[in-house]
């Protein structure tokens, strides 16, 4: 069973009803699938007198990405995002966000997704996340960061007593990796090693380009011919910053002893090139999922 997304602001599983006390619930609020996958959604309507049985109409907001039949059977077709909406005959409705991932081989030990997590197209940002969090927010600060008690004071993933409670962890648990958590561990965030391979492999080319009006980093493999585009869409604090020139993407790795535990490893790029960087964990960055090779 696909895990539920705990804190997201996207409209997944919202409850609506036309009559007093009527609302509809889906058994899954978020599905993270690969192109070609099938899944089943089940709808139930509740009222002030308990559970009710209704006929449901089903629809997809983006049928090029995912379709649904009259019984709630979902078919993932291509990379992107879509909302699958169930509508009861009494007017109640609910939606499940379906994220469809498609992967290509750039060399190394993993396959790379062609879109950001939550994005509908390669040129779109997708969802911003603080490091290790599983939901989107209106602002990203130390005050509302899940693993901090105050600025630079940590309660998880910390190797230095000056920064709070020490647990010695330097890699996200699978339960704190948003991609792994929502995909039953089929996919995950890139590791530090995955990023280092992407940056150092001589057969992997990188170029800062403008693609369909969006600046970003094109990455391609000279050996496989595959390529991906990473949009330069900045990072999120009180608002999105550096969104026209810079790109920032989390890995699952905490910064090492050459930095500080209040930072995690990320890909950072601009017109000058792409590097491995250490970024404050509370900031909202983008995520490009990966998948282990068979």
Image (cartoon, helix red, strand yellow):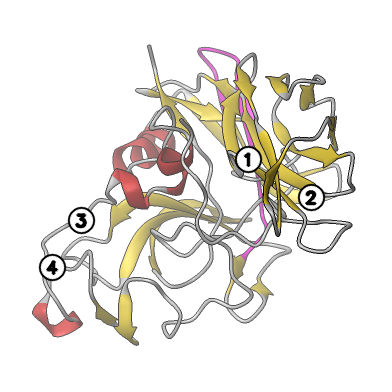
Residue ID at (68%, 42%): 97
Q: Earlier in the sequence, mark 3 or mark 1?
A: 3
**Dot 2 and dot 3 residues touching (CB under 8 Å):** no
Is 263 rendered above or below residue 275?
Answer: below
Q: Quadrant of residue 18?
A: bottom right
- Mark 3, residues whose alpha carbon is within 10 Å: few (<14), some, or many (≥20)? some
The residue indicated by pointer 1 is: 207
Q: Which mark is residue 159?
A: 4
Q: Which mark is residue 214?
A: 2
Given this view, does label 3 or label 1 mark the residue nearer the observer? 3
Q: Earlier in the sequence, mark 2 or mark 3?
A: 3
- Mark 4, residues whose alpha carbon is within 10 Å: few (<14), some, or many (≥20)? many
Label 2 and label 3: CA atoms lie apart by 34 Å
**Dot 2 and dot 1 residues touching (CB under 8 Å):** no
Label 1 and label 4: CA atoms lie apart by 36 Å
Magenta region: 220-234
For the C terminus, which image quadrant?
A: top left
Residue 50 vs residue 7, the one in the foreground: 50
Q: Quadrant of residue 241?
A: bottom right
How many numbered discs, if any? 4
Q: Earlier in the sequence, mark 2 or mark 1?
A: 1
**Dot 4 and dot 3 residues touching (CB under 8 Å):** yes
- Residue 142 visible in the displayed image: yes
Q: Secondary structure at mark 3?
A: loop
Label 4 and label 2: CA atoms lie apart by 39 Å
Q: Earlier in the sequence, mark 1 or mark 4?
A: 4
């Amino acid at each position: 069973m696909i895990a539920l997304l705990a804190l997201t602001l996207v409209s997944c599983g919202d409850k609506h009803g036309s009559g007093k006390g009527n609302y509809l619930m889906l058994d899954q609020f978020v599905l993270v699938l690969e192109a070609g996958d099938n899944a089943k959604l089940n709808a139930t309507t509740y009222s002030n007198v308990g559970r009710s049985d209704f006929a449901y109409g089903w629809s997809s907001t983006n049928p090029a990405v995912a379709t649904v039949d009259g019984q709630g059977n979902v078919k993932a077709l291509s990379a992107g995002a879509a909302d699958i909406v169930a509508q009861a005959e009494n007017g109640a409705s609910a939606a499940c966000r379906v994220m469809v991932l498609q992967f290509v081989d750039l060399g190394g030990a993993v396959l790379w997704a062609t879109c950001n997590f939550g994005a509908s197209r390669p040129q779109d940002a997708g969802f911003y996340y603080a490091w290790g969090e599983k939901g989107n927010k209106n602002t990203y600060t130390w005050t509302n960061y899940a693993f901090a008690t105050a600025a630079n004071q940590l309660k998880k993933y910390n190797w230095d007593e000056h920064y709070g409670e020490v647990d010695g962890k330097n890699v996200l648990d699978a339960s704190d990796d948003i991609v792994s958590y929502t995909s039953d561990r089929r996919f995950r965030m890139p590791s530090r090693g995955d990023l280092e391979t992407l940056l150092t492999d001589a057969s992997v080319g990188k170029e800062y380009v403008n693609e369909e009006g969006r600046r970003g980093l094109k990455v391609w493999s000279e050996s496989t011919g595959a390529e991906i585009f990473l949009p330069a869409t900045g990072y999120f604090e009180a608002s999105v910053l550096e969104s026209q020139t810079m790109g920032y993407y989390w890995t699952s790795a905490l910064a090492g002893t050459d930095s500080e535990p209040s930072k995690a490893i990320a890909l950072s790029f601009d017109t000058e090139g792409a590097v491995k960087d250490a970024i404050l964990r509370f900031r909202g960055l983008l995520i490009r999922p990966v998948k282990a090779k068979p």
